[in-house]
Image: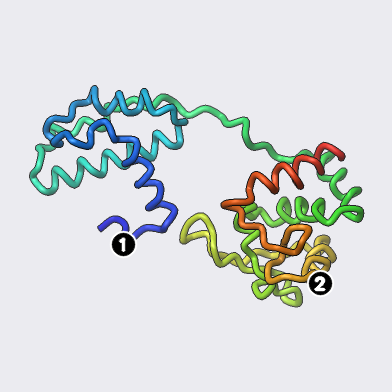
Amino acid sequence: IKFEKISPSNINGYKASYKLCESIYNKQLKEIKLIHLQSIVDNSGKNYPTLKKLKTFLSQMYDYAVMQDIISKDADKTEFIDIGTKTESNLHYKFTNEEIDALWRWSSSNDYVQVILMLIYSGARTGEFFNVKKADVKLEEGYFNIVEGKNANAKRRVPIHHKLMPFYENWMSKDGEYLITKLNGKRFDFKSDHRQYTESYWNPILKDI
């Protein structure tokens, strides 16, 4: 019932949460105690965002069980699951004005420096941006469409900053169906090519600059 109303990415999230619960697969819901649920969390090795999804998943399972009279409301102990506290991630950072100025100075010498600036100024996720097809870019109107993203709300129209118009014109002039491609003109499939993009394009460019 839930899957009929949510996006594929959210469905995968629920499936991943269920997979973490393998230790209680063969237990009846009435037999599952808070200590079992807490043990799943403690032994998962997952970070806070993943554990938050797991707790939400378990809570919804118990809500359904209460609704179907499988257990009483008092038997739902999911609110007491301790998933720790959210900590600030050091995986993401924003570019400083000085770093952005450096990117501009290099933008005429490397097309993939242009891509970094296009990402910064658009605010699009890298996976979203690499899924943009040339047919979705409207240069005369000054925007491009994101038709596929992390969730259903990702679809949107993104304005193109006037300073970056030459970059979009440059990439539109290249071969291929997609706006941004590899050196060989093939598509970046970010699900499989994420690491390749990071190691072969992103990191070397920033290191050189």
- List x then y, in percent, for residue 91: 62, 34
- List x then y, in percent, for residue 192: 59, 51
- Tell me what residue is drawn at x 57 percent, y 65 percent: 156
Q: Nearer the viewer, residue 111 or 199?
A: 199
- Picture quarter containing residue 121? bottom right
Amino acid carrying mark 2 in the image: Ser
Q: Split into 4 quadrants, where in the image is the C terminus?
A: top right
Count residues near mark 2 (Cα–Cα under 10 Å), then give few for <14, some for 14-19, many for 20+.
few
Q: Disc number at residue 173? A: 2
Of helix, strand and loop, which one carries label 1? helix
Q: Disc number at residue 201? A: none
- 185 versus 91 height, above or below: below
Q: Disc number at residue 4? A: 1
- 170 versus 22 height, above or below: below
- Picture quarter containing residue 102? top right
Q: Nearer the viewer, residue 20 or 105?
A: 20
Q: How many marks?
A: 2
- Mark 2 and mark 1 in contact? Answer it, CB < 8 Å: no
In primary-sequence order, the first of circles 2 and 1 is 1
Count residues near mark 1 (Cα–Cα under 10 Å), then give few for <14, some for 14-19, many for 20+.
few
Q: Between marks 2 and 1, how big is the CA–CA gap?
A: 41 Å
Q: Nearer the viewer, residue 133 or 137?
A: 133
- List x then y, in percent, for residue 31: 13, 30
- 162 versus 119 height, above or below: below
In the rendered view, does 176 fall on the left or right side of 56? right
- List x then y, in percent, for residue 179: 71, 66
Q: Residue furthest front?
A: 184
Q: Split into 4 quadrants, where in the image is the N terminus?
A: bottom left
In the rendered view, does 137 fall on the left or right side of 34? right
In the rendered view, does 61 fall on the left or right side of 136? left
